[in-house]
Image (spheres, rainbow, N blue to C red):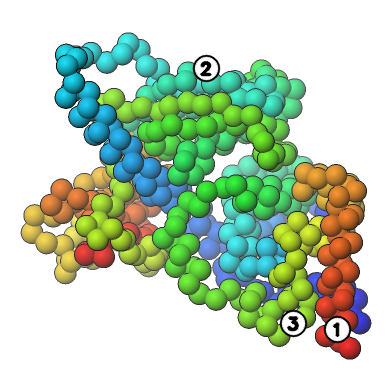
Amino acid sequence: MDRAAGAAEAPPKETPASFEDFFEAERHRLHGALTLMTASVHEAEELVQDAFLTVWERWDRVREMERPDGYLYRVAMNAFRRRRRRLRLDLRLRAAVEDAPDPFARVAAGDAAARALAVLPRRERAALVLTEMLDFDSNEAGELLRIKPSTVRVLAHRARERVRREIGDDDG
Amino acid sequence: MADLRERLEDLAGRFPEREGMDGLDRSRRRRQLRSRVLAGSLALLIAAVGTASAYLAFRGTRPPVADQPPAIPDTLRIECDGTTAHVLTPKVRVRPDGVRLEVTNTASFETWTVLSLSSGSGGSPIVPAGQTKTSVTTQLIPGESDVWCGPSREDVNDDPVEDHLEIVDPDGVWVSDQLDCPSGRGVGGSWSGTGEPGMGSPEDQVRERYANKIREGDNLDRAGYPEADDEWGIDVRLTREGRVTATFHFFGNPTDGWYHDSYSACQEF
Protein backbone atom coordinates (compact mmCIF):
# COMPACT_ATOMS: atom_id res chain seq x y z
CA MET A 1 0.00 0.00 0.00
CA ASP A 2 1.22 3.47 -0.79
CA ARG A 3 2.62 5.52 1.96
CA ALA A 4 0.50 8.60 1.51
CA ALA A 5 1.36 11.92 3.00
CA GLY A 6 -0.79 13.52 5.64
CA ALA A 7 -3.36 15.97 4.46
CA ALA A 8 -1.94 18.89 6.38
CA GLU A 9 1.66 18.58 5.25
CA ALA A 10 1.30 17.65 1.63
CA PRO A 11 1.40 20.29 -1.09
CA PRO A 12 -1.88 21.60 -2.39
CA LYS A 13 -3.72 19.18 -4.61
CA GLU A 14 -5.42 20.02 -7.82
CA THR A 15 -8.94 21.18 -7.34
CA PRO A 16 -11.19 18.14 -7.81
CA ALA A 17 -13.32 18.33 -10.92
CA SER A 18 -16.42 17.32 -9.04
CA PHE A 19 -17.57 16.15 -5.67
CA GLU A 20 -17.91 12.66 -7.11
CA ASP A 21 -14.23 12.66 -8.08
CA PHE A 22 -13.28 13.91 -4.65
CA PHE A 23 -15.42 11.27 -3.01
CA GLU A 24 -13.85 8.47 -5.02
CA ALA A 25 -10.35 9.76 -4.39
CA GLU A 26 -10.67 10.09 -0.63
CA ARG A 27 -13.22 7.64 0.65
CA HIS A 28 -11.06 4.53 0.91
CA ARG A 29 -8.38 6.18 2.99
CA LEU A 30 -10.80 7.99 5.26
CA HIS A 31 -12.83 4.86 5.76
CA GLY A 32 -9.77 2.83 6.63
CA ALA A 33 -8.48 5.42 9.07
CA LEU A 34 -11.81 5.81 10.82
CA THR A 35 -12.26 2.06 11.02
CA LEU A 36 -9.02 1.82 12.94
CA MET A 37 -9.85 4.81 15.12
CA THR A 38 -13.26 3.49 16.08
CA ALA A 39 -12.45 -0.22 15.91
CA SER A 40 -15.79 -0.55 14.20
CA VAL A 41 -16.60 -0.77 10.54
CA HIS A 42 -20.19 0.18 11.21
CA GLU A 43 -19.28 3.30 13.12
CA ALA A 44 -16.65 4.24 10.56
CA GLU A 45 -19.18 3.95 7.76
CA GLU A 46 -21.50 6.31 9.55
CA LEU A 47 -18.73 8.79 10.23
CA VAL A 48 -17.49 8.63 6.66
CA GLN A 49 -20.94 9.21 5.31
CA ASP A 50 -21.60 12.06 7.69
CA ALA A 51 -18.30 13.69 6.81
CA PHE A 52 -18.83 13.43 3.08
CA LEU A 53 -22.41 14.60 3.39
CA THR A 54 -21.21 17.67 5.24
CA VAL A 55 -18.57 18.36 2.62
CA TRP A 56 -21.09 17.78 -0.12
CA GLU A 57 -23.47 20.32 1.36
CA ARG A 58 -20.68 22.89 1.32
CA TRP A 59 -18.94 21.71 -1.78
CA ASP A 60 -19.07 25.04 -3.60
CA ARG A 61 -16.83 26.52 -0.95
CA VAL A 62 -14.85 23.42 -0.03
CA ARG A 63 -13.69 22.80 -3.59
CA GLU A 64 -12.07 26.22 -3.59
CA MET A 65 -10.02 25.44 -0.52
CA GLU A 66 -6.35 24.77 -0.83
CA ARG A 67 -6.82 21.39 0.80
CA PRO A 68 -10.37 20.02 0.46
CA ASP A 69 -9.12 16.75 1.88
CA GLY A 70 -7.84 18.58 4.94
CA TYR A 71 -11.29 20.00 5.48
CA LEU A 72 -12.77 16.53 5.06
CA TYR A 73 -10.55 15.13 7.77
CA ARG A 74 -11.36 18.02 10.04
CA VAL A 75 -15.06 17.41 9.63
CA ALA A 76 -14.60 13.69 10.15
CA MET A 77 -12.57 14.18 13.29
CA ASN A 78 -15.09 16.64 14.65
CA ALA A 79 -17.74 14.00 14.20
CA PHE A 80 -15.49 11.37 15.74
CA ARG A 81 -15.01 13.52 18.83
CA ARG A 82 -18.58 14.72 19.00
CA ARG A 83 -19.87 11.20 18.85
CA ARG A 84 -19.20 10.69 22.52
CA ARG A 85 -21.85 13.17 23.50
CA ARG A 86 -24.20 12.93 20.60
CA LEU A 87 -27.44 11.20 21.28
CA ARG A 88 -28.41 8.29 19.12
CA LEU A 89 -30.82 9.50 16.52
CA ASP A 90 -32.27 6.23 15.37
CA LEU A 91 -32.29 3.54 17.97
CA ARG A 92 -34.30 1.14 15.92
CA LEU A 93 -31.99 1.25 12.95
CA ARG A 94 -28.94 1.16 15.12
CA ALA A 95 -30.22 -1.86 16.98
CA ALA A 96 -30.66 -3.63 13.69
CA VAL A 97 -27.13 -2.81 12.68
CA GLU A 98 -25.60 -3.75 15.97
CA ASP A 99 -27.22 -7.12 15.92
CA ALA A 100 -24.81 -8.05 13.17
CA PRO A 101 -21.20 -8.73 14.15
CA ASP A 102 -18.90 -5.89 13.19
CA PRO A 103 -16.39 -6.89 10.49
CA PHE A 104 -13.67 -5.34 12.60
CA ALA A 105 -14.30 -7.89 15.31
CA ARG A 106 -13.96 -10.71 12.82
CA VAL A 107 -10.65 -9.37 11.57
CA ALA A 108 -9.44 -8.76 15.11
CA ALA A 109 -9.97 -12.39 15.88
CA GLY A 110 -7.15 -13.27 13.52
CA ASP A 111 -4.95 -10.20 13.50
CA ALA A 112 -2.78 -9.12 16.37
CA ALA A 113 -2.64 -5.46 15.36
CA ALA A 114 -6.40 -5.25 15.12
CA ARG A 115 -6.75 -6.95 18.49
CA ALA A 116 -4.35 -4.50 20.03
CA LEU A 117 -6.14 -1.55 18.51
CA ALA A 118 -9.48 -2.80 19.67
CA VAL A 119 -8.53 -2.66 23.32
CA LEU A 120 -6.83 0.73 23.17
CA PRO A 121 -8.62 3.75 24.59
CA ARG A 122 -10.38 5.65 21.85
CA ARG A 123 -8.11 8.69 22.02
CA GLU A 124 -5.02 6.54 21.87
CA ARG A 125 -6.30 4.87 18.73
CA ALA A 126 -7.04 8.21 17.14
CA ALA A 127 -3.67 9.66 18.07
CA LEU A 128 -1.90 6.63 16.68
CA VAL A 129 -3.75 6.59 13.38
CA LEU A 130 -3.43 10.33 12.87
CA THR A 131 0.28 10.46 13.54
CA GLU A 132 1.49 7.06 12.42
CA MET A 133 -0.69 6.32 9.44
CA LEU A 134 -1.90 9.71 8.22
CA ASP A 135 1.31 11.60 8.96
CA PHE A 136 -0.22 14.44 10.92
CA ASP A 137 2.27 15.90 13.33
CA SER A 138 1.36 16.24 16.97
CA ASN A 139 0.34 19.88 16.57
CA GLU A 140 -2.06 19.06 13.77
CA ALA A 141 -3.38 15.96 15.49
CA GLY A 142 -3.81 17.95 18.67
CA GLU A 143 -5.84 20.52 16.82
CA LEU A 144 -8.06 17.84 15.37
CA LEU A 145 -8.53 16.07 18.67
CA ARG A 146 -8.70 19.30 20.68
CA ILE A 147 -5.95 18.22 23.01
CA LYS A 148 -2.43 19.49 23.60
CA PRO A 149 0.32 18.37 21.24
CA SER A 150 2.17 16.95 24.21
CA THR A 151 -0.89 14.87 25.03
CA VAL A 152 -0.98 13.59 21.46
CA ARG A 153 2.61 12.48 21.77
CA VAL A 154 1.90 10.68 25.01
CA LEU A 155 -1.20 8.99 23.65
CA ALA A 156 0.48 7.99 20.41
CA HIS A 157 3.53 6.73 22.21
CA ARG A 158 1.52 4.56 24.54
CA ALA A 159 -0.61 3.25 21.72
CA ARG A 160 2.42 2.54 19.56
CA GLU A 161 4.13 0.62 22.28
CA ARG A 162 1.10 -1.44 23.07
CA VAL A 163 0.44 -2.31 19.45
CA ARG A 164 4.06 -3.05 18.75
CA ARG A 165 4.20 -5.29 21.77
CA GLU A 166 1.16 -7.15 20.57
CA ILE A 167 2.47 -7.43 17.02
CA GLY A 168 5.83 -8.52 18.32
CA ASP A 169 4.26 -11.19 20.41
CA ASP A 170 2.28 -12.30 17.43
CA ASP A 171 5.25 -12.30 15.10
CA GLY A 172 7.50 -13.86 17.55
CA MET B 1 8.36 -7.25 13.28
CA ALA B 2 6.46 -5.57 10.49
CA ASP B 3 6.66 -1.82 10.18
CA LEU B 4 3.84 -0.37 12.20
CA ARG B 5 2.71 2.04 9.52
CA GLU B 6 2.54 -0.70 6.93
CA ARG B 7 0.70 -2.87 9.38
CA LEU B 8 -1.87 -0.18 10.03
CA GLU B 9 -2.31 0.61 6.36
CA ASP B 10 -2.68 -3.03 5.54
CA LEU B 11 -5.24 -3.40 8.26
CA ALA B 12 -7.13 -0.30 7.13
CA GLY B 13 -7.37 -1.68 3.62
CA ARG B 14 -9.09 -4.82 4.76
CA PHE B 15 -12.42 -3.16 5.38
CA PRO B 16 -13.97 -2.25 2.04
CA GLU B 17 -16.83 0.19 2.05
CA ARG B 18 -20.25 -1.10 1.35
CA GLU B 19 -21.45 1.67 -0.88
CA GLY B 20 -20.18 4.32 -3.21
CA MET B 21 -21.66 7.53 -4.47
CA ASP B 22 -25.12 6.08 -4.92
CA GLY B 23 -25.14 5.02 -1.32
CA LEU B 24 -24.02 8.43 -0.21
CA ASP B 25 -26.83 10.03 -2.15
CA ARG B 26 -29.33 7.72 -0.53
CA SER B 27 -27.82 8.48 2.85
CA ARG B 28 -28.25 12.16 2.27
CA ARG B 29 -31.93 11.65 1.73
CA ARG B 30 -32.24 9.19 4.56
CA ARG B 31 -30.49 11.48 6.97
CA GLN B 32 -33.06 14.13 6.33
CA LEU B 33 -35.83 11.64 6.79
CA ARG B 34 -34.35 9.94 9.82
CA SER B 35 -33.88 13.16 11.70
CA ARG B 36 -37.56 13.76 11.32
CA VAL B 37 -38.66 10.23 12.08
CA LEU B 38 -36.61 9.96 15.19
CA ALA B 39 -37.29 13.41 16.35
CA GLY B 40 -40.80 12.09 16.60
CA SER B 41 -39.84 10.23 19.73
CA LEU B 42 -39.70 13.57 21.43
CA ALA B 43 -43.04 14.45 19.98
CA LEU B 44 -44.76 11.69 21.89
CA LEU B 45 -43.32 13.02 25.10
CA ILE B 46 -44.27 16.53 24.16
CA ALA B 47 -47.74 15.40 23.28
CA ALA B 48 -48.07 13.59 26.58
CA VAL B 49 -46.77 16.54 28.54
CA GLY B 50 -48.93 18.88 26.55
CA THR B 51 -51.99 16.76 27.14
CA ALA B 52 -51.26 16.51 30.83
CA SER B 53 -50.58 20.21 31.06
CA ALA B 54 -53.77 21.02 29.25
CA TYR B 55 -55.70 18.69 31.48
CA LEU B 56 -54.26 20.20 34.62
CA ALA B 57 -54.79 23.70 33.33
CA PHE B 58 -58.39 23.19 32.49
CA ARG B 59 -59.13 21.10 35.55
CA GLY B 60 -58.10 23.90 37.86
CA THR B 61 -60.14 26.80 39.12
CA ARG B 62 -58.66 29.29 36.74
CA PRO B 63 -60.91 30.20 33.89
CA PRO B 64 -59.67 29.05 30.52
CA VAL B 65 -57.61 31.55 28.68
CA ALA B 66 -59.17 32.29 25.37
CA ASP B 67 -56.32 34.08 23.66
CA GLN B 68 -52.78 33.00 22.96
CA PRO B 69 -50.03 34.98 24.61
CA PRO B 70 -49.32 37.91 22.36
CA ALA B 71 -46.92 37.73 19.51
CA ILE B 72 -44.77 34.66 19.86
CA PRO B 73 -42.29 35.22 17.04
CA ASP B 74 -42.16 32.72 14.21
CA THR B 75 -38.47 33.19 13.57
CA LEU B 76 -35.84 31.88 15.92
CA ARG B 77 -33.16 34.55 16.16
CA ILE B 78 -29.76 33.69 17.53
CA GLU B 79 -26.67 35.80 17.76
CA CYS B 80 -23.33 34.04 17.89
CA ASP B 81 -20.32 35.94 19.15
CA GLY B 82 -17.93 33.13 18.39
CA THR B 83 -18.08 31.38 21.73
CA THR B 84 -21.65 31.75 22.95
CA ALA B 85 -25.04 31.56 21.32
CA HIS B 86 -27.36 34.30 22.53
CA VAL B 87 -30.96 33.42 21.92
CA LEU B 88 -32.86 36.60 21.14
CA THR B 89 -36.21 34.83 20.89
CA PRO B 90 -36.30 32.27 23.73
CA LYS B 91 -39.75 31.14 22.67
CA VAL B 92 -40.61 30.71 19.02
CA ARG B 93 -43.54 29.14 17.26
CA VAL B 94 -43.37 26.78 14.33
CA ARG B 95 -44.44 27.71 10.85
CA PRO B 96 -46.25 25.43 8.41
CA ASP B 97 -42.96 24.61 6.69
CA GLY B 98 -40.88 24.12 9.82
CA VAL B 99 -38.91 26.31 12.18
CA ARG B 100 -37.34 29.41 10.73
CA LEU B 101 -33.87 29.97 12.09
CA GLU B 102 -31.90 33.18 11.65
CA VAL B 103 -28.35 33.33 12.92
CA THR B 104 -26.27 36.47 13.11
CA ASN B 105 -22.57 35.98 13.46
CA THR B 106 -20.78 38.85 15.18
CA ALA B 107 -17.46 37.04 15.38
CA SER B 108 -14.53 37.77 13.14
CA PHE B 109 -14.49 34.18 11.96
CA GLU B 110 -16.88 31.67 10.47
CA THR B 111 -19.16 30.02 13.00
CA TRP B 112 -21.80 27.39 13.11
CA THR B 113 -24.75 26.94 15.36
CA VAL B 114 -26.13 23.67 16.65
CA LEU B 115 -29.50 23.20 18.25
CA SER B 116 -29.68 20.18 20.46
CA LEU B 117 -33.04 18.66 21.24
CA SER B 118 -33.18 15.86 23.73
CA SER B 119 -33.85 13.51 20.83
CA GLY B 120 -30.94 14.69 18.76
CA SER B 121 -29.33 17.66 17.10
CA GLY B 122 -30.49 19.76 14.25
CA GLY B 123 -30.00 22.98 12.39
CA SER B 124 -26.35 23.75 12.05
CA PRO B 125 -25.88 26.44 9.46
CA ILE B 126 -22.44 27.83 8.94
CA VAL B 127 -22.43 31.61 9.07
CA PRO B 128 -19.63 33.60 7.48
CA ALA B 129 -17.56 35.94 9.58
CA GLY B 130 -18.46 39.39 10.71
CA GLN B 131 -21.97 40.65 11.29
CA THR B 132 -23.48 38.37 8.72
CA LYS B 133 -26.85 36.74 8.88
CA THR B 134 -28.00 33.37 7.62
CA SER B 135 -31.55 32.12 7.53
CA VAL B 136 -32.75 28.56 7.08
CA THR B 137 -35.95 26.66 7.64
CA THR B 138 -35.31 23.56 9.69
CA GLN B 139 -37.44 20.56 10.53
CA LEU B 140 -36.89 20.88 14.24
CA ILE B 141 -39.88 19.69 16.15
CA PRO B 142 -41.67 21.47 18.99
CA GLY B 143 -40.00 21.22 22.34
CA GLU B 144 -37.18 22.60 24.37
CA SER B 145 -33.70 22.81 23.00
CA ASP B 146 -30.22 23.84 23.94
CA VAL B 147 -28.23 25.81 21.46
CA TRP B 148 -24.51 26.12 21.05
CA CYS B 149 -22.34 28.01 18.63
CA GLY B 150 -18.66 28.23 17.98
CA PRO B 151 -15.99 28.30 15.33
CA SER B 152 -16.96 26.21 12.33
CA ARG B 153 -13.48 24.75 12.15
CA GLU B 154 -13.56 23.40 15.68
CA ASP B 155 -15.78 21.15 17.66
CA VAL B 156 -17.82 21.50 20.81
CA ASN B 157 -15.58 21.22 23.80
CA ASP B 158 -16.53 19.14 26.80
CA ASP B 159 -18.14 22.06 28.63
CA PRO B 160 -19.87 24.10 25.98
CA VAL B 161 -21.68 27.31 26.83
CA GLU B 162 -25.25 26.77 25.83
CA ASP B 163 -28.34 28.89 25.78
CA HIS B 164 -31.86 27.60 25.95
CA LEU B 165 -34.97 28.01 23.88
CA GLU B 166 -38.40 26.58 23.38
CA ILE B 167 -40.19 25.81 20.15
CA VAL B 168 -43.94 25.87 20.56
CA ASP B 169 -46.78 24.81 18.34
CA PRO B 170 -49.88 26.59 19.64
CA ASP B 171 -51.88 25.87 16.52
CA GLY B 172 -50.99 22.20 16.24
CA VAL B 173 -49.26 22.63 12.91
CA TRP B 174 -46.79 19.81 13.38
CA VAL B 175 -48.28 16.34 12.98
CA SER B 176 -46.53 13.65 14.98
CA ASP B 177 -45.13 10.62 13.25
CA GLN B 178 -44.20 8.87 16.48
CA LEU B 179 -45.41 5.31 16.71
CA ASP B 180 -47.85 4.58 19.50
CA CYS B 181 -47.68 0.82 19.77
CA PRO B 182 -49.93 -1.15 22.13
CA SER B 183 -47.09 -3.60 22.63
CA GLY B 184 -44.66 -0.78 23.16
CA ARG B 185 -42.46 -2.17 20.42
CA GLY B 186 -41.81 -1.01 16.94
CA VAL B 187 -40.33 -2.98 14.09
CA GLY B 188 -39.16 -2.17 10.62
CA GLY B 189 -36.68 0.51 9.89
CA SER B 190 -35.37 -1.54 7.01
CA TRP B 191 -35.11 0.31 3.78
CA SER B 192 -37.38 -1.02 1.12
CA GLY B 193 -36.67 1.35 -1.74
CA THR B 194 -36.50 -0.15 -5.20
CA GLY B 195 -34.53 2.60 -6.86
CA GLU B 196 -37.50 3.57 -8.97
CA PRO B 197 -40.30 5.95 -8.11
CA GLY B 198 -43.60 4.35 -7.35
CA MET B 199 -46.85 5.08 -9.09
CA GLY B 200 -49.18 7.63 -7.63
CA SER B 201 -49.11 9.63 -4.46
CA PRO B 202 -47.33 8.36 -1.37
CA GLU B 203 -50.69 7.47 0.12
CA ASP B 204 -51.63 5.50 -3.00
CA GLN B 205 -48.33 3.63 -2.85
CA VAL B 206 -48.88 2.73 0.77
CA ARG B 207 -52.37 1.42 0.02
CA GLU B 208 -51.05 -0.74 -2.79
CA ARG B 209 -47.85 -1.98 -1.22
CA TYR B 210 -49.32 -2.74 2.18
CA ALA B 211 -52.80 -3.78 1.04
CA ASN B 212 -52.57 -7.04 2.96
CA LYS B 213 -51.82 -5.23 6.20
CA ILE B 214 -54.15 -2.27 6.04
CA ARG B 215 -57.47 -2.84 7.72
CA GLU B 216 -60.82 -1.25 7.26
CA GLY B 217 -60.95 1.86 9.38
CA ASP B 218 -57.24 2.57 9.16
CA ASN B 219 -56.50 6.17 8.29
CA LEU B 220 -53.64 7.51 6.22
CA ASP B 221 -52.46 11.09 6.44
CA ARG B 222 -49.29 13.16 6.22
CA ALA B 223 -47.05 13.66 9.22
CA GLY B 224 -44.54 16.39 9.95
CA TYR B 225 -44.87 19.95 8.76
CA PRO B 226 -47.60 20.30 6.16
CA GLU B 227 -45.75 22.77 3.97
CA ALA B 228 -42.24 21.42 4.40
CA ASP B 229 -40.03 21.58 1.37
CA ASP B 230 -39.98 18.41 -0.72
CA GLU B 231 -36.29 18.02 0.00
CA TRP B 232 -37.18 16.77 3.46
CA GLY B 233 -39.25 13.96 2.02
CA ILE B 234 -42.71 12.97 3.09
CA ASP B 235 -43.94 10.87 5.95
CA VAL B 236 -47.27 9.13 5.64
CA ARG B 237 -48.65 7.77 8.86
CA LEU B 238 -51.23 5.09 9.39
CA THR B 239 -53.53 5.58 12.35
CA ARG B 240 -55.42 2.61 13.69
CA GLU B 241 -57.95 3.03 16.47
CA GLY B 242 -56.48 6.38 17.30
CA ARG B 243 -52.89 5.20 17.48
CA VAL B 244 -50.12 5.88 15.01
CA THR B 245 -49.38 2.30 14.03
CA ALA B 246 -47.03 2.72 11.07
CA THR B 247 -45.19 5.42 9.22
CA PHE B 248 -43.91 5.30 5.65
CA HIS B 249 -41.20 7.52 4.38
CA PHE B 250 -40.83 8.84 0.87
CA PHE B 251 -38.54 11.17 -0.97
CA GLY B 252 -38.91 12.74 -4.36
CA ASN B 253 -41.33 15.30 -5.66
CA PRO B 254 -44.73 15.41 -7.34
CA THR B 255 -43.20 15.80 -10.80
CA ASP B 256 -40.60 13.04 -10.83
CA GLY B 257 -42.47 10.74 -8.52
CA TRP B 258 -42.09 9.50 -4.97
CA TYR B 259 -39.61 6.87 -3.85
CA HIS B 260 -40.65 4.70 -0.96
CA ASP B 261 -37.60 4.72 1.20
CA SER B 262 -38.41 3.08 4.49
CA TYR B 263 -41.07 2.32 7.00
CA SER B 264 -41.52 1.90 10.72
CA ALA B 265 -44.39 -0.01 12.22
CA CYS B 266 -45.71 -1.47 15.41
CA GLN B 267 -45.33 -5.19 15.78
CA GLU B 268 -49.09 -5.46 15.52
CA PHE B 269 -48.99 -4.03 12.01
Residue A5 falls in image quadrant: bottom right
Q: CA distance from mark 2 to mark 1?
A: 61 Å
> In the rendered structure, which amino acid carries the disc numbered 3?
Asp
- The amino acid type, in three-letter code, at marker 1 is Asp
Could you tell whether B238 is left or right of B11 in the image?
Answer: left
Q: Are marks 1 and 3 in contact (CB under 8 Å)?
A: no
Residue found at x 68% / y 40% = B158
Sort mark 2 into few (<14), some (14-19) or many (20+) by Cα contacts within 10 Å.
few
Residue B118: where, in percent of width, then height? 47, 41
Question: Observer-nearest residue: B197 or A113?
Answer: A113
Residue A32 seen by the camera: no
Residue lying at the far top of the rendered structure:
B70
Residue, disc 2: B88
Image mark 3: chain:
A
Q: Do labels 2 and 1 touch, CB within 8 Å? A: no
> What x and y, as percent, mark residue B114?
57, 35
Kindly report the distance in space between the C-alpha atoms of the residues bearing marks 1 and 3.
12 Å
Residue indicated by mark 1: A169
Any mark on residue A111, and which? Answer: 3
Q: Secondary structure at mark 3?
A: loop
| Residue B197 located left or right of residue B67 | right
Name the residue at the left extreme: B216
Q: Residues within 10 Å of mark 3 (few under 14, many from 20)?
A: some
